[in-house]
Image (tube, rainbow, N blue to C red):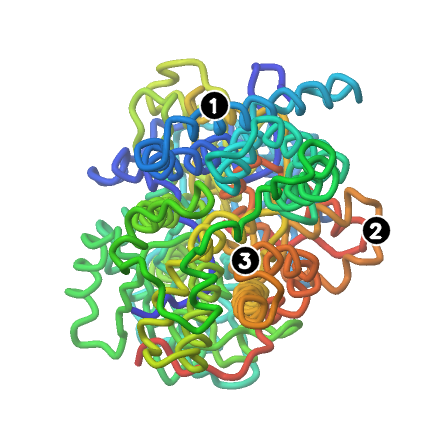
Amino acid sequence: MTGKLGLTINTSPHIHSQQHGRQIMLDVVLALSPSLVAACGLISMRALLLAATSTGACVLFECLFCKLTRRRNTIEDCSAVVTGLILAFSFRATTPLWMAVCGAFIAIVLVKNLFGGLGNNVMNPALTACYLTLQINKYIVSPLASPILSAVDVLSAATPLTQLKAGLMPDASLFHMLLEKTGGSMGEVSSLLLLLGGAYLVWRDVIKLRIPLAYCGTVALLTLLFPRGHAPFLFMLYHLLGGSVLFGALYVATDYASSPVTAGGQWLYGIGCGVATVLLRYYGPSAEGVTYAILLMNLFARPLDRLGAPRRFGTGPKKRAARK
Amino acid sequence: MKKGFWGGVHPPARKELTQAASPRIIPMPRELIFPLAAGGGAPQAPAVHIGDVVCIGQPLSLEEGESTPLHASVSGRVVAIEARSHPKGMQVHSIVIENDHQYTKAPSIKRRPDAAALSPSAIYSIIRAAGIAGTGGAVFALERPIDTLLINACECEPYVTADDSLLCYYTEQVVLGIELIAKLLRPTHIRIAIEDNKLAAAAALHTHVKDTPIAIHVLPTRYPQGAKEQLIQAVTGKQIPPGSTAADVGCAVYNVATCASVYKAVYAGEPIIKRIVTVTGGAIKKPENFIAPIGTPLSHLIEAAGGFVRAPHKIIAGGPMMGVAQAVLDAPLVRSINAVICLGDEDRVKQVHPVCMRCGKCLAACPMHLQPLYAYRYERTGKPYKLPPLHLEDCLECGCCAYVCPGKLPLVEIIRRCKQTLGIAAREVRP
C-alpha cells in the first residue's frame, strides 16, 4: 500500500532478513554439487546425464502442472531443481532415463503439487518417487520388458550392507567407504563430500543439526550396542558409512515440509528415523532401511510437532539465574 | 555461554550512522502539535482554550484517573484544538501551539535544592504530576517491595541510538534518576542491562556507578533483548508466567530515558517536554541524534537532518522492527517515539508472492516460544478453533518471525488478525 508521498505502508517489521526461499534452494544445490562431481568422476559421466534429466523433468512437470491448473508458475523458487537433484541422487548411475522422468512426475505432480505445493507435502517427494519408481519397474515394467533379466535392485551386488547383514565384515575398507563408495546410489559416493555439503548447509542456516545428529547418533548408538559380529566400533562405522544414512540424514530427512518444525519434534523424528533404519536393516527384508524409515517417519512429522511443541513462556521449571 | 533467552534475531544494527556525536538541540519548529490521546484511547480533556498563551511546562490536559497529563514544550499561543495526524496513523484530537520563540518557562520549573532529601511520597507525586509513566505500562507505586530494579539500557532495535547517546553524554542524569526510583521502590538489587554494542555507554556508566550499589550487566546483542520478558529472563533467569506482570517475579523494569525524566522532574521541576530522537536511515542526508521538543512535526525533524538524499521508500516512527510506517509527515513527535527512520529503496522486500515453506525459522526465532507458522496455516485454512492453544496472547509483536521468514510472509500482520478474531487486545507498543 502506498500513501500520498509514494511511501510504502504496511505493518512492522520494516526490515527483513536477506535470506530468500530461492537462495535456500540454491544453497542445497551448491551443497550437493561436489557429490555430483564425485559421482561423475568415480562412476561415470552418465551421472550428470541422469541428474540433468531428472532436474529438467521436474521443472517441466511443475511448469505443466501450473499451466494446466491455471496457477502462477512456481518454478522460480527452484524447489523443483532441488527435488530433481535429490531424486537423481537416490538412483544408481546406471538407472534408465525413463525412470528419472517417471520419478519426476510422481515427485512433483503427485507428492508435492497435488498436496498443495511448496511447504505442504506430507512425504518427501524425491524419496517417495524413487521408491515408487523402483517398485513400478520391478513389478510392472521389467517383467513385461525382459522377464529373464532381474529388475534394477538395490541389492543386486554384494554390497557392504548385505555383507554386514549376513554377519560378515565388508571387503571394502573404511577409507573406500568414506571417499569412493561406488556400489550404491549416486548420492552415497563420497561420504566426505556429503558431510562437507551438510556442514555448508548448517553454516548457511538452511538445516539445523538436530535431525542429522539425532538420526546418525541413534544409528551409531544402536549399532554400537547391538552389533552383529566381533568388532562393535568397526561395525558401527560401516553402518554409518554404508548405505545412504548420511545422505538421508542430511538431505532427505531434513526436507522442510515433511519434517517437524519444533525442536522437540525434530529430536524425536531423528531418533525415530534412526531406530527404524536399524530395525529394518537388521530384521527387514532388504539390507537397506533408510528409505522406508524416512517415509515412515514422514507420516509422524506433524504429530511429533505437537508432541515436541515448545513449552509456553513462563510455565517452565524455575531456572538458575543466568548471572549473579 | 548461556544464551539468556530462546530465539531472537540479529538484524544489521546500522548504529554507526548516528553513534559518534553528541545529540544536538534542534532548530525550533514554528508549530507544535500535542495529541490528547495516546493513539487509540479516549482523548483527555484539554486544560486550555484557543487563543490562550501558554508557557513551557504548563499542563495542557486535565489529569483524570490513571492518565498522565500532557505539558507544553514551548511557549506560545494555542491556535487550534482539532484532529491532527498521530504517528500511529489515526487522526487524534490535538492541541496546536504556535511557537512565539520566547521560551518562557512556567514558574514550577526551577531547581530543587532539597531534591536529594525528598521523601518517597513527595517524589511519587512529582513524578505523577510531571506526566512520567514507565514504559510498557510500568507504574512507580508498588504495594510490595521488589527484588530487582532493572534498568533497560539495551536499545535493541537497529538504527536507534537515542538511549546510547543519553548514556554517553548525560550519564549523571540517568544515574541520579535511578537512585530516585530506587528510593521509591526499595529494591534489594539494582541492575542496569546494556547490550555489548554500546561499550562507550557502558564505560560511561561504570565511572558513574562506581561507589553505588548499582551493578552493570553487559548482555550479548540480540533483538529483542530490551523487551521486558527477555530482559528479565536474561538477567535474573526468571520467565514471567502467563497473565502475570514483572512485579510478580520481583522485578520492575524502567528505560534509561524514563530515569532521566525522573531526574529532571525532581531536581529541575521539569515535566517531559523534550527528548532525544534519532533521525536516521539510508535516505537521510545527515543522520543524527537531536534533542527535540515534544510536539515537533516529523517533517521538521527530517529537515533538520538535512532532508532526503534519495527518495525514501518508507518512513518509520520508532524502530524498524516495531515502529509504525508513516503515510504523511505532519504527525508530531510524541514522548514514546525514539527514532524517525527513512529507509531507501535498498531495504525494500523484493519477493512479491509470500509462501510458507515449513522451514520452522519463525519458531526458532520467536522469543515467546510461539509457533507463528501454525497461526498462519490455521488462519489460512479457516480453522480459528485451532488458534487458542497457540497462546497468541503471549505474542509481543516484536517482528522476529516476519524478519526471519524466507518466504516473506507478513507474520505479524497475520498474528494481529488472529488476535482480532480471538478478541485479544493488541500488545502495547513499547517505545
- In the rendered structure, find residue A290 and report the number of the disc placed on it: 3
* Marks 3/2 same chain: no
Q: Taking A5 as reference, is A23 above or below it?
A: below
Mark 2 element type? loop
* Marks 1/3 same chain: no
Q: What's the residue at 62%, 27% (across, down)?
A: A98
Residue B142 screen position, x and y as percent: 54, 78
Mark 3 element type? helix
Residue A110 screen position, x and y as percent: 74, 36
The quadrant the N terminus of chain B occupies is bottom left
- Of badges 3 and 2, nearer the viewer stands 3
How many residues crowd around disc 3 within 10 Å: few (fewer than 14), some, or many (20 or more)? many
Residue hosting label 2? B383
Measure the C-alpha gap from mark 1 to mark 3.
63 Å
Which amino acid type corresponds to the residue marked 2 in the rendered image? Lys
Q: In the visual, does B422 lie left or right of B76?
A: right
Query: Which residue is at the front of the view, B246 or A170?
Result: A170
- Of badges 2 and 1, nearer the viewer stands 2
Which amino acid type corresponds to the residue marked 1 in the rendered image? Ser
Tell which circle, 2 or 1, labels the residue nearer the N-terminal end: 1
Q: Taking B365 as reference, is B158 above or below it?
A: above
Q: What's the residue at 51%, 59% (across, down)?
A: B367
Q: Please say whether residue B46 is visible from this viewpoint.
A: no
Q: In the visual, does A166 lie left or right of B259?
A: right
- In the rendered structure, find residue B299 and report the number of the disc placed on it: 1
Dots 2 and 1: beta carbons under 8 Å? no
Mark 1 element type? helix
- Of badges 1 and 3, nearer the viewer stands 3
